[in-house]
Image (cartoon, rainbow, N blue to C red):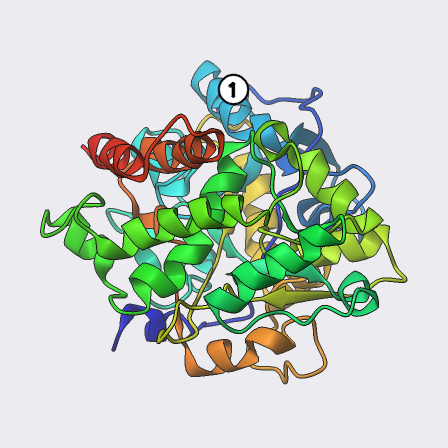
Amino acid sequence: MSQHHRSRVVRTGLVAAAAAGALILAGCSGAGDDNAASTGFTLSYAVTNSAVVAPYKALAEAYMKENPDVKITLNEVPNDSYGQTLTTQLNAGNASDAFQTAPGVGQTYSTVTLAKAGLLEPLADSATKVIPSGSESQFEVEGDTFGVALGLTFVGSVLNATTAKSAGFTYPTDWDGLISSCKDVAAKGKSLFVLAGSMPPNTGLMAMSISATRVYADDPTWNEERAADKTTFASSQGWKDTLEDIVDMNKAGCFQKGVQGAGFDSITSNMLQGSSLAAFVPSGSASDLKQNAKDQEFQIQAIPPAAGGEAFGIAGADYALSISKKSKNKAAAQKFADWVATADGQKVFADAAGSLPVGQDLSDTPFAPVADIVDKGDFVPLPNASWPNAAVYDALGSGVQGLLTGQKTVDQVLADMDKAWG
């Protein structure tokens, strides 16, 4: 069974979150023995917009409602500094008891990376039971599980369907149609896409979204071949096509003016104000946007394939909950993790995150445009979740920035990614 087919088999309801954030305030735990008698603990997570309810906050509030004797101190961190903040605090021994992590190894706060560094506490069997089938390597190290899987997210683009309809725009089904649409939309003073061009996490996500049809549709095991040194980024025609498509998009005016210096705030403002029609963000962001604009509708769209290609996507559990090895309140945090892994906990997170409702009819949901892809299992997990280190994804994200400014060539970006792979 192929990797992308296995990924659709989920053992239980999953949840996904779009990134969120604010600032780690206080209430951090320190090193020492577990306080088994304590019912309180601290929880950190990332937020991008304080106006929306972060899925991790929704989990905490629901848990405290069911358990009035429990006090969870929430520590919100801005999304663009979350990884660095968390790893700094973990190494200093003053991180929160429980916190948001990312499955796999591709980011600074990835579950496996932190577990191998000895910074995470092994979790109970409740966490093992909710790992999506085929994704065990993204949560387990030497037989222990270090993260509760949170969410099945589709990674493509989110379209403001209300703005698109008023502009007479229909989402293209092939790449030539997308480039043509970019020019048409730009001629009307808008942009088809808004991109946080100064933020490598967003430029990298765009590249991975495009790689779904250029790389992984033909070879869902490409990452395994790269790990075995049977291929490289520089020798991959699919990765070359992916980055050359981004160069073509920039030339066609697909992005908003000033894209090179834009931050995450541009995504929210352009999408809600109607100056851009779509953004490269996880599907859960549609729920965040809807909370800010209840009169507007948002749809999840796959990136169109090149001529002759087939529709394909990226989907998987993108977020997790982990516990600090140095937590003073492990017992209380573990009880929370047990509850998060239940059907009730998973549903709370899914409702707040707007994650993929696996096994349900998608026709009347924001996921309707990608329903066929999901039903057929034509997707792979987020590629960077199985890359060996965060530097590879950083090289991709910063490399795309270089493509936008003209300071990098496609070949240079691919060479940088191979060098970062090691």
Residue in view at x 79 percent, y 69 percent: 165
Measuring from the top left, give residue 127's x and y in whole percent.
Answer: 46, 56
Q: State which quadrant residue 286 falls in.
A: bottom right
Residue 314, compared with residue 333, is above or below; it is: below
Viewer-side residue, 229 vs 329 = 229
According to the picture, the residue beneath numbered tag 1 turns out to be: 89
Give the class, few, some or many, for how many residues have Cα within 10 Å of label 1's Cα (few <14, many ≥20): some
Q: Position of residue 329 (x, y in %)?
A: 57, 32
Q: Amino acid at mark 1?
A: Gln
The residue under the point 35% across, 41% down is: 105
Q: Give coordinates of residue 198: x percent, y percent.
A: 56, 29
Of 84 and 245, nearer the camera is 245
In the image: residue 407, left or right of residue 370 = left
Quadrant of the image containing the N terminus: bottom left
Measured from the top left, where is residue 81 in percent x and y? 57, 25
| Residue at (32% x, 54% y) in the render | 241
Residue 48 in view here: no
Q: Is 404 placed above or below 33 here?
A: below
Image-based side of 233 in relation to 33, left or right:
left
